[in-house]
Amino acid sequence: MGIKSFQGPRKKSQNLDETLMTVNDYMTRKLITFRPEQSVEEVIQALIRHKISGGPVVNEKNELIGIISEGDCIKHISESRYHNLPMENRLVEQHMIKNVETIDGNMNIFDAANKFLNDKRRRFPILENGKLAGQISQKDILKATVKMKSQRWWK
C-alpha cells in the first residue's frame, strides 16, 4: 500500500525570469530638468514647488551634463553664508555634480536595487541614444516591488 498525498495538484511555479521587470518599466520619463545657466535660487524654488529632491541638468540637445540636488543647494547656501557672499547670480553649472553615473534601462529591478544599495545614490538617470530618457529613484524601486509582490515573485 503506497503513501497517499492529501495535497491537491500543485500549480506549476512560474519561472522567475517571466516576472522580472526592468528599469524601463518603472522609470519616470516626465522629468523636471535644469539648465546649467539657471540660478541655484531657481532650482531651490523648483525643488520645493515640485516636492523633489533633485534633478538632471541637460544642455540644449537634452544631453545629460550633470545632476543638482537639495544637498548641492544647501552646500551653496552654507558656503555663501560662511564667506559672506551674495547668493544670487550663482549658476547651476557651478554647483552641479558633473560626473553622473547612469544605468541601463534594460537592467532588471533587482539589479537596480542592489546598485542603489552599493552606490548609495537616490536616483540614476537613464540615457537612450545619448539623450536623457528618464530617471529611476529609490521610490520607483519600491513601487516595482509592491507590484511584483502582487504577482508572488517571492515564492
Image (cartoon, rainbow, N blue to C red):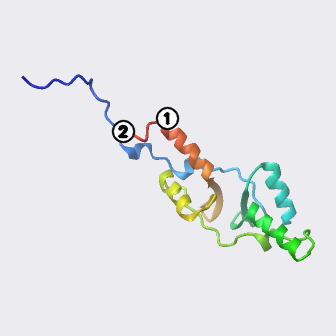
**Relative depth, front residue between 31 and 50:** 50
Q: Secondary structure at mark 2?
A: loop
Image height check: is 147 above or below 58?
A: above
Q: Are marks 1 and 2 in contact (CB under 8 Å)?
A: no
Using residue 65 as the reference point, say whether residue 75 is left or right of it.
right
Q: Nearer the viewer, mark 1 or mark 2?
A: 1
**Is 127 situated left or right of 9 in this image?**
right
Residue visible at 91% across and 75% down in the picture: 85
Residue annotated with mark 2? 14
Asked which quadrant contains residue 14, the reply is top left
Q: Is residue 146 above or below residue 98?
A: above
Quadrant of residue 135 in the image?
bottom right
Residue 12, visible in the rendered structure: yes
Q: Which residue corresponds to the image point at 73% horizontal and 64% vertical from the top-left? A: 58
Quarter of the image where the N terminus is located:
top left
Q: What label does residue 150 carry, if any?
A: 1
Q: Can residue 36 be seen from the camera position used here?
A: no
Q: Position of residue 137 (x, y in %)?
A: 62, 53
Question: Which amino acid type corresponds to the residue marked 1 in the rendered image?
Answer: Ser
Q: Position of residue 155 (x, y in %)?
A: 38, 39
**Residue 140: percent from left, percent from top:** 60, 48
Residue farthest along the left direction in this orientation: 1
Please state which amino acid type lies under the numbered disc 2: Gln
Quadrant in the rendering for residue 9 = top left
Mark 1, residues whose alpha carbon is within 10 Å: few (<14), some, or many (≥20)? few
Label 1, label 2: how many angstroms apart (C-alpha)? 14 Å
Q: Earlier in the sequence, mark 1 or mark 2?
A: 2
